[in-house]
Image (cartoon, rainbow, N blue to C red):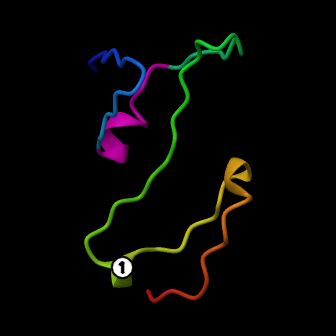
């Protein structure tokens, strides 16, 4: 496991299985310094992309329709 310090405006792209599920646990203090992960999906082939569920904080975005599997 490796710690990575990010500054405001930095971005880190990682493999979900290696990075996100292996991070150290923490208790949120809600003091503005907690670490939160935002989710983004990057794909090469939209035909293979799985339709997902939007999180509550993205409720103002249009929901995905249809989609091929």
Residue appearing at x 37%, y 17% in the figure: 7
Q: Can you tell which quarter of the image residue 19 is in? A: top left
Prevailing secondary structure of the magenta residues: loop
Residue appearing at x 26%, y 18% in the figure: 2
Residue appearing at x 63%, y 64% in the figure: 53
For residue 49, above or below residue 33: below
Say which element carries label 1: helix
Q: Is residue 26 left or right of residue 56?
A: left
Image quadrant in which the N terminus is located:
top left
For residue 35, above or below residue 66: above
Q: Nearer the viewer, residue 1 or 28?
A: 28
Residue neighbourhood size for the residue with mark 1, other residues' Cα within 10 Å, grouped as few (<14), some (14–19), many (≥20): few
Q: Residue furthest front?
A: 9
Magenta region: which residues? 15-24
Question: In the rendered structure, does residue 57 fall within the stretch colored magenta?
Answer: no
**Residue 18 point in image, percent of width and height:** 30, 39
Q: Is residue 53 left or right of residue 59?
A: left
For residue 16, above or below residue 5: below
Name the residue carrying label 1: 46
């Amino acid at each position: 496991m490796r710690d990575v310090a990010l500054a405001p405006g930095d971005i880190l792209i990682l493999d979900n299985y290696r990075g996100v599920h292996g991070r150290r646990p923490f208790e949120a203090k809600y003091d503005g310094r907690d670490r939160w992960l935002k989710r983004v999906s990057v794909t090469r082939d939209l035909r293979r992309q799985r339709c997902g569920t939007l999180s509550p904080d993205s409720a103002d975005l249009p929901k995905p329709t249809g989609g091929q599997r």
